[in-house]
Amino acid sequence: MRFSEIQKKEVIDSTKGTFLGYVQDATIDVANGKVELLHVNAGERGFFFDSKQNDLTKIRLQDISIIGKDIVLVGKKKTKE
């Protein structure tokens, strides 16, 4: 999946059911070319974002449970024991 496919999607915390913001940017490991962090801005979605660094939340890729068609769900999946 390309980053452009998840950019501007809504990010929801599945454990609390809260809206976290929209995917704005990513931190990429240049050695292997993989995304490490997604940068989420709590501001409104628009064509241009005038975001401050304080408004950004960084989410590790390991914390994402599902990337759907319209949203990204954050939160660990519960495993059956």
Image (tube, rainbow, N blue to C red):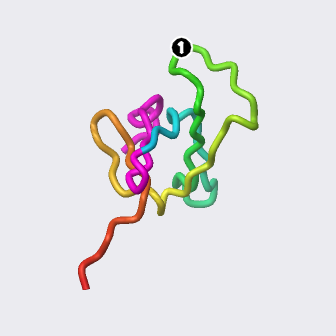
Instruction: Give me the residue at 51% from left, 21% from top.
Output: 45
Foreground pick, 37 / 78: 78
Q: Is residue 13 left or right of residue 59?
A: left
Q: Position of residue 9 (x, y in %)?
A: 42, 32
Residue type at mark 1 is Phe
Residue positioned most to the bottom = 81
Left/right of residue 71 with respect to residue 46 in the rendered view: left
Q: Label 1: few (<14), some or many (≥20) within 10 Å?
A: few
Image quadrant for the N terminus? top left
Q: Residue at x 34, y 46 (%)?
A: 67
Find residue 15 and report its image quarter: bottom left
Residue extending farthest to the top is 47
Judge by depth and name the residue closer to the eye, 48 or 18.
Answer: 18
Q: Position of residue 71 (x, y in %)?
A: 35, 38
Image position of 46 (left or right of 58):
left
Q: Quadrant of the C terminus?
A: bottom left
Asked if residue 9 is among those painted magenta in the image, a careful observer would answer yes
Q: Residue furthest left?
A: 80
Query: Is 56 placed above or below 76 here?
Result: above
Bounds of the magenta segment: 1-17
Please determine whether, in this image, residue 41 is positioned above or below residue 61.
above
What residue is at 69 percent from the left and 35 percent from the top?
55
Point out residue 43 in the picture as x, y percentages from the top left corner: 59, 26
Is the residue 47 above or below the residue 5 in the image? above
Find residue 20 and report its horizontal and vertical position in percent: 51, 40
Secondary structure type for disc 1: loop
Q: Nearer the viewer, residue 17 or 56?
A: 17
Count of labels shown? 1
At 60% across and 15% down in the image, what residue appears? 48
Residue bearing the label numbered 1: 47
